[in-house]
Image (cartoon, helix red, strand yellow):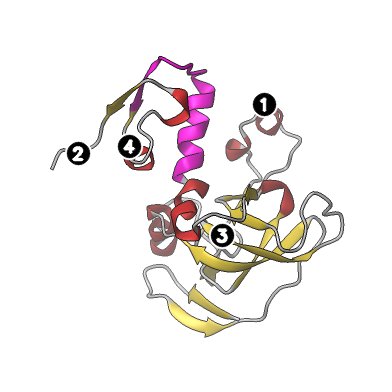
Amino acid sequence: METAVIHGFGEPLHIEEMPVREPGKNEILVKVITCGICHTDLHACQGDWPAKAKMPLVSGHKAIGYVIALGKGVNKIREGDIVGVPWLYSACGCCDYCYTGWETLCETQQNGGYSVDGGFAEYVVADAQYVAHFPSHIKFTEMAPIICAGVTVYKGLKQTKAKPGNTQWHNDPGLHRRNPQGHGRSHLIRGGRQA
């Protein structure tokens, strides 16, 4: 398969052939249709954070595509399903963070396009427990941001226990352009830089 791979921090991406990995236990193989880019991908490729990304690295954590193969133990996903592959590749599932819904703080979490290869490739392997399901009528390029920024907005609304009629502050209202009342809120205060 063709991949966009980086071999060292600060180096450019190179298009290279790599073998397609077979899905292991509880994993799926996804034929990538689109993969968005996030500033996190740039940080990973530059080595900006104390915990460094693996090298060589296939970056990308906003991949959406069709499931084409199932590993052992996968039973809630079918071949042909459309799924999104997010930043959180997997977590331990048994620490205090995982038990309380904060898997993103799990000390043994794995991250797509960081500690495991991501979606800048023709195919990506994903943990079946952490992918998002999408309906068949979606526009793939419009849904890719939902896998990252959309999940962030949703988690904030969920954690604040926001109710219809509440005023909400969104520092980056880009995801609400089509539906400024997003998630049933009647008021949206927009933040971010002024042009």
> Does the stretch in magenta take in 143?
no
Q: Which amino acid type is marked by label 3?
A: Ile
In which quadrant of the rendered view does residue 73 lie? bottom right
Q: CA distance from mark 3 to mark 2?
A: 30 Å
- Frontmost of labels 4 and 2 is 4
Q: CA distance from mark 3 to mark 1?
A: 27 Å
- Where residue 28 appears, as percent x and y from the top left, is 73, 61
Residue 53's disc number: none
Q: CA distance from mark 3 to mark 4?
A: 22 Å
Earlier-in-chain disc, 1 versus 2? 1
- Placement of 24 over or under 191, stated as above or below: below
Residue under the image location 71 percent in, 73 percent down? 21
Badge 4 density bin: few <14, some 14–19, many ≥20, Cα 10 Å:
some
Helix, strand, or loop for circle 1?
Answer: loop
Say if mark 1 contacts mark 2, CB within 8 Å: no
Q: Which residue is mark 2?
A: 193
- Where residue 62 appears, as percent x and y from the top left, is 51, 56
What span is colored magenta in the figure? Answer: 149-169
> Does the stretch in magenta take in 156?
yes
Q: Which residue is mark 1?
A: 100
Residue under the image location 42 percent in, 68 percent down? 9
Earlier-in-chain disc, 4 versus 2? 4
Q: Which residue is mark 4?
A: 173
Q: How many marks?
A: 4
Earlier-in-chain disc, 4 versus 1? 1
Q: Which residue is mark 3?
A: 64
